[in-house]
């Protein structure tokens, strides 16, 4: 007798999985919680400054980026997650930087440069995405985000309040990385456009 049982996929042993078009996923739930909790954290930064509670809350929210990524890799990456996850990162990081600028810990100049870069590159990628031209995230951009997270963490870390230059230096390093990664995105977009106009095999 022929065995007609379906062949199990490699992910079946991990339990429930989601397809690329799924929206209501555990990974997205964690991402949404990060966005919803962010305003409360910003309020703590503005009202309490550098305290262990603020530092712990910042590290907890920042760590959820790794958690939702881990869940997505186990249960299936989705297009909605690819959009929501970096958006949540930008909300958390830019909100933290602006909160620290409001209380005078950071200058507005580097914060506004970072904000302008994030807005410009996001619009750039969306624009080309409308024409089917994908510009994937770069490692340099991910490093930039990590440095920004560490800069905010340093600014609200109670034991570093006597050495504020540490957080400020990290912030300016992240500015340099933001501009560098932004320039690389522009180069990537031009190269992708060239490949689209001149497919392989066509002069």
Image (cartoon, helix red, strand yellow):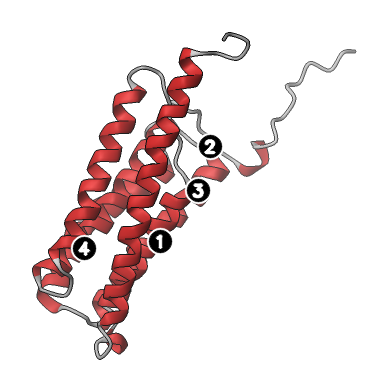
Find numbered disc 4 in the image and state the secondary structure of the residue it sits on: helix
| Spatial separation of the CA atoms under disc 2 and disc 3 | 8 Å
Q: Label 2 crowding class (10 Å Cα cut-off): few <14, some 14-19, many 20+? A: some
180 to the left or right of 111: right
**Residue 62 appears in the rendering:** yes
Residue at left offset 36%, top offset 69% = 150
Q: Label 4 crowding class (10 Å Cα cut-off): few <14, some 14-19, many 20+? A: many
Determine which residue is flagged by label 2: 76
Q: Quadrant of residue 86 in the image?
A: top left
Residue 56 locus on image (x, y percent): 32, 75
**Residue 33 appears in the rendering:** no
Residue at the extreme right = 1
Determine which residue is flagged by label 4: 97
- In primary-sequence order, the first of circles 2 and 3 is 3
Residue 142 locus on image (x, y percent): 43, 52
| Spatial separation of the CA atoms under disc 4 and disc 3 | 27 Å
| Spatial separation of the CA atoms under disc 4 and disc 1 | 13 Å
| Spatial separation of the CA atoms under disc 2 and disc 4 | 32 Å
**Foreground: 203 or 200?**
203
Determine which residue is flagged by label 1: 146
Find numbered disc 3 in the image and state the secondary structure of the residue it sits on: helix
189 to the left or right of 166: right
1 to the left or right of 59: right
| Spatial separation of the CA atoms under disc 3 and disc 1 | 20 Å
């Amino acid at each position: 007798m022929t065995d007609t049982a379906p062949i199990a996929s490699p992910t079946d042993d991990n339990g429930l999985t989601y397809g690329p078009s799924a929206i209501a996923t555990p990974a997205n739930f964690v991402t949404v919680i990060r966005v919803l909790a962010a305003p409360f954290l910003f309020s703590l930064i503005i009202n309490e400054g550098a305290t262990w509670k603020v530092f712990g809350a910042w590290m907890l929210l920042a760590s959820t980026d790794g958690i939702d990524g881990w869940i997505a890799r186990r249960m299936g990456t989705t297009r909605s997650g690819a959009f929501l996850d970096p958006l949540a990162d930008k909300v958390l990081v830019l909100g933290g930087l602006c909160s620290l600028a409001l209380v005078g810990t950071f200058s507005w100049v580097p914060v506004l440069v970072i904000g302008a870069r994030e807005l410009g590159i996001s619009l750039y990628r969306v624009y080309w995405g409308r024409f089917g031209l994908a510009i994937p995230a770069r490692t340099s951009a991910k490093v930039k985000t990590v440095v920004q997270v560490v800069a905010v963490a340093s600014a609200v870390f109670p034991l570093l309040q006597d050495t504020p230059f540490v957080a400020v230096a990290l912030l300016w390093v992240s500015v340099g990385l933001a501009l560098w990664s932004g320039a690389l995105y522009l180069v990537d977009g031009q190269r992708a456009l060239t490949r689209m106009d001149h497919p392989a095999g066509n002069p």
